[in-house]
Image (cartoon, helix red, strand yellow):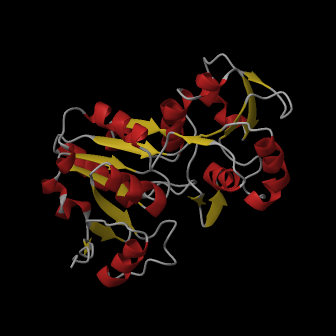
């Protein structure tokens, strides 16, 4: 007879468990930043953790490079003294692009073009492409994945590989939830399309984080995030304790008790060590 996984424990602050860990991997969107403004309590919690000489690595499925995310956080007033490095899905994805050729059909916006800087690529229309790189929707505040069905059908029929630079299905932007490239990757796979992903929950991005954080034992690293299919799945796969943020993309389904949060996690085959409404 197998035992049921223990429900996660509610905590009131990061400081309550900080002594158990020597490093942190922390998500960005939905945890320390909502796409428009920073979360001041989260900023101070990470800053306090670093004051004890312990490193914080921000890990995000943003399809950008580290400097672009640093600048975006700085614009929101988020201090660089609250973290050490940023590891992005865009950074990991870059290494995949050259393996599929040069001619790229890009589904996304110009703000993600730093993803391609320094790579020998040529942007083409769909008919001449050797691959599809999806970093966002073309107009993510107005479109949904359903509107991409004809385009994705044509691309899948040609057998083009899709490289998904942002595995998130949705992301918080202010009070809204916005569709991300991960939703297109799901639709493409459903059509039989070939999809390649480097960001969370896949191991490659955590290996980069582990390299950046130094030789800290994984049992002494806490992963913080709000996304079950990305943050919590990724932490579990890499053998890390997880702190689940309730007021993120799953805020309407998680509830607030250990029993309700544990039940949602169990349905997904997941566990988390702790939960907290908002990182503080």
Q: Nearer the viewer, residue 4 or 109?
A: 4
Of the 4 image quadrants, the one containing the C terminus is bottom left
Task: Point out residue 249 in the picture as x, y percentages from the top left corner.
Answer: 52, 66
- Tell me: residue 6, above or below residue 124: below
Residue 265 appears at what percent x and percent y? Answer: 38, 72
Q: Residue at x 64, y 26 (%)?
A: 100
Residue 245 placement, left or right of 241? right
Residue closest to the eye, 190 or 39? 190
Q: Total marks drawn? A: 0
Q: Residue at left 64%, top 55%?
A: 186
Q: Which quarter of the figure has residue 202?
A: top left
Asked whether residue 59 is in view, the answer is: yes
Could you tell me which residue is drawn at 39 percent across and 52 percent down? Answer: 234
- The quarter of the picture where the N terminus appears is bottom left
Above or below, 102 against 226 in this view is above
Quarter of the figure with residue 64:
top right
Q: Quick check: 22 above or below 267?
A: above
């Amino acid at each position: 007879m197998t035992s049921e996984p223990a429900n996660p424990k509610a905590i009131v602050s990061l400081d309550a468990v900080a002594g158990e860990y020597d490093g942190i991997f922390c998500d960005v969107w939905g945890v320390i930043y909502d796409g428009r403004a920073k979360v001041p309590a989260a900023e101070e919690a990470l800053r306090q953790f670093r004051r004890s000489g312990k490193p914080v690595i921000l890990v995000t499925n943003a399809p950008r490079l580290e400097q672009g995310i640093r600048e975006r956080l700085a614009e929101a007033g988020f201090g660089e003294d609250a973290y050490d490095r940023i590891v992005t899905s865009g950074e990991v994805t870059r290494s995949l692009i050259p393996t599929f050729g040069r001619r790229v059909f890009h589904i996304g916006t110009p703000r993600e073009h730093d993803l391609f800087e320094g790579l020998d690529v040529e942007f083409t229309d769909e008919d001449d492409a050797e691959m599809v790189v999806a970093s966002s929707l073309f107009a993510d505040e107005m479109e949904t994945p359903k509107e991409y069905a004809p385009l994705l059908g044509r691309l899948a029929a040609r057998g083009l590989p899709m490289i998904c630079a942002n595995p998130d299905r949705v992301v918080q932007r202010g009070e809204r939830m916005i569709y991300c490239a991960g939703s297109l990757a799901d639709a493409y796979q459903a059509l039989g399309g070939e999809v390649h992903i480097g960001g969370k929950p896949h191991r490659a991005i955590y290996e980069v984080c582990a390299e950046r954080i130094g030789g800290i034992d994984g049992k002494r690293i806490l992963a913080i995030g709000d996304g079950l299919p990305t943050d919590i799945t990724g932490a579990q796969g890499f053998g890390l304790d997880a702190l689940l943020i309730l007021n993120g993309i799953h805020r309407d389904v998680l509830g607030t008790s250990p029993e309700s949060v544990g039940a949602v996690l169990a349905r997904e085959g997941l566990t988390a060590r702790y939960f907290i409404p908002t990182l503080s």
